[in-house]
Image (tube, helix red, strand yellow):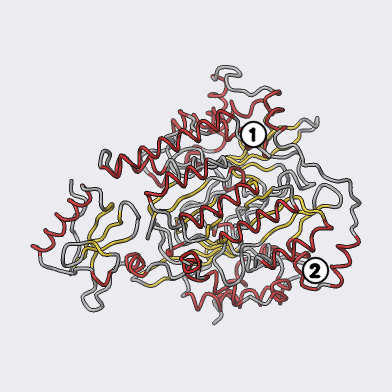
Amino acid sequence: MSTAKHKGKGPQSLTANELRGGASVWLDANMEWSRDFGDAFKTEDENHIEKMRAKGDADANENLVVGVYFIDIEPDSGLPVRYREKFRVKGPSYDTAEELGLNAKKAK
Amino acid sequence: MYRYDEFDHEVVQSRVKQFRGQVERRLSGAITEEQFRPLRLQNGLYLQLHAYMMRVAVPYGTLSSKQMRQLGMIADKYDRGYGHVTTRQNFQFNWPELTHVPDLLQDLADVEMHGFQTSGNCIRNVTSDPYAGATAEEIEDPRPTAELLRQWSTLHPEFAFLPRKFKIAVVASKTDRAVIRAHDIGIEVTANEKGEVGYHIIVGGGLGRTPIIGQTLRAFLPREELLPYLEATLRVYNRYGRRDNKYKARIKILVTETGIDAFREMVEAEYEALEPLDIAVSAQEVERISSYFAPPDFENLPEHCDAFQAKLISEKDFADWAGNNLAEHKVPGYSIVNVSLKPTDLAPGDITADQMRAVADMAEAYSFGEIRTTHQQNIVLPHVKKSDLYSLFEKLKEAKLHAGNIGLITDIICCPGMDFCALATARSIPVSQAIAQRFSDPARQRAIGEMQIKISGCINACGHHHVGHIGILGLEKAGVEFYQVKLGGDSSENAAVGKVTGPGFSQEELVDAIERLVDYYIDVRAEDERFIDSFKRLGMAPFKEALYAA
Ligand code: SF4
């Protein structure tokens, strides 16, 4: 089952969510999932894209990730083209936990 | 307060066990995501933009202090130390991990809570008046009716796969604090000329991409006919509701396309054909359910409270808060207390775990352990003695829950928007914060008076922007957010859908535009005239001019 059809234009990255934790992840150059978009592998090379697709499908089948799909990348900025995807990269612009330092408090 | 009976208890507990098994099977690969997705949604677990999101049902917005304390524990244990009150009176947690959710559900089940009916095309969690059981305006407490509907609709096999989700709200006052006219079915408990109590049934309201105000299906339905009549209505919808197009599948489209009279005929025909009294509930059963909502042991107090009056004179900040956040209670010597979750610097409806525990403590000390959530994303302590109000205010201050802005311009309804929601087109939280900060001066807010700003981050309208006095819809074009404005919406018993003013604004332009609009209103209002009344009197044109005057 192909979960990650590549239909985009220009450089591509592959994204998903971790099945267990739910965090957004991107596939890096070593074909590992990273929670940091900075690590994301961005390529226009069809061979690489095919490898990424295969890895995405395999890891979805292995129940590591869920909702695998390709995203278009702006060649200049290296950021996702779609506004929504930019947001997935940055995380919420506002989160009460960040605002009030609740995570830090919890970690104590 | 209602307690789940043995049947409910068993169902909730067995669902936790069942879901634990489903999660295990999902993680092991025994079931696929396609198979798992409806199962997790049926338990309130969504996958959002950045993480899973757990929606917890709060039937008719009623919570006990014990439940609130448990929600606080859950926020700390499985989330990031806070939760969010939604416009359907539910609770949401933004960051749980799938592997923790079975334990989270067990902790919920321990206090008779769950995520049923918070997702999917079923009859959703029934909402109601947060002042239920406390306001003198009501004919009776609407919650026994809401509870009856909960029992009827929970796991109703025939209505588990409706054409689309189905929302019901119940009130028992002329003042509508539950937006019943924007629900698939709105129910108003009412009395006929003979003084018999029954129901005014409104159908086909809704927001979303096609906002429609509901219409009367039956002006008076005798009490015992409620469930059979709703069953007939749902059957007609289940059969004729459009399954071919998701955007046309709500009952409002069926009612609009069919016409209310023809729709009513279809319902009445179905009702005639129903097995007589098949599912009608006996008076004894209604009595039994109502007994769970018996009033708490109110003291016999005079209406006037010297200590309270004295504090109103000596403590200005208390007087300002009390002037705005209290509502009249039906029992002399008591007040309904609105606790605002809209401080000007935090996201509307968010509440920290510490604040949840503080609210639980306050409810125990001052409000018979009772708490309500509101569709305005605030909290209500329904039964507080006037003599306790000042101590309560001090506790609210300690917990930073003392914003005195209920119903004012900074009491903004705001959905999570692009910061959290996978369906969003733009952010809504920063917009609400920018507006709240612009109008942060409490004296200015009070001078402006009642004003409802409602913001949605997409066309789905969870932030009720269609019925805001000022409604704001976040959109995006070519990577830039912009905000469309509607004016003249009304969520009250005089429900109305606002009209779009014209081209959208950037966030910065929007805040200036709203300020111009508000200043214009202050200039032209007649004495004591609310914004919405001035708008109705003068019409769109001058307000639109003010909005775009830059
Ligand atoms: S209105 Fe749109 S953005 Fe806001 S919560 Fe609903 S679906 Fe999400």
Disc 1 element = strand
Give the farthest residue toward the bottom: B550
Foreground residue among B80 and B221: B80
The N terminus of chain B - image quarter: top right
Q: Residue at x 26, y 38 (%)?
A: B30
Report the amino acid beneath label 1: Arg
Q: What is the distance, in whole Å, between disc 2 and disc 1 at their CAs?
A: 44 Å
Q: Is residue B145 above or below residue B472?
A: above
Report the amino acid beneath label 2: Ala
**How busy is the neighbourhood of tag 2: few (under 14 within 10 Å), some, or many (20 plus)?**
some
Give the farthest residue toward the front: A108
**Badges 2 and 1, same chain:** yes
Q: Residue at x 61, y 44 (%)?
A: B60
Disc 2 element = helix
The C terminus of chain B - image quarter: bottom right
Give the farthest residue toward the top: B276
Foreground residue among B434 and B51: B51
Q: Which mark is residue B319?
A: 2
Residue B403 image point, x, y percent: 67, 67
For the question of whether residue B145 can be seen, the reply is yes
Which residue is the site of mark 1? B218
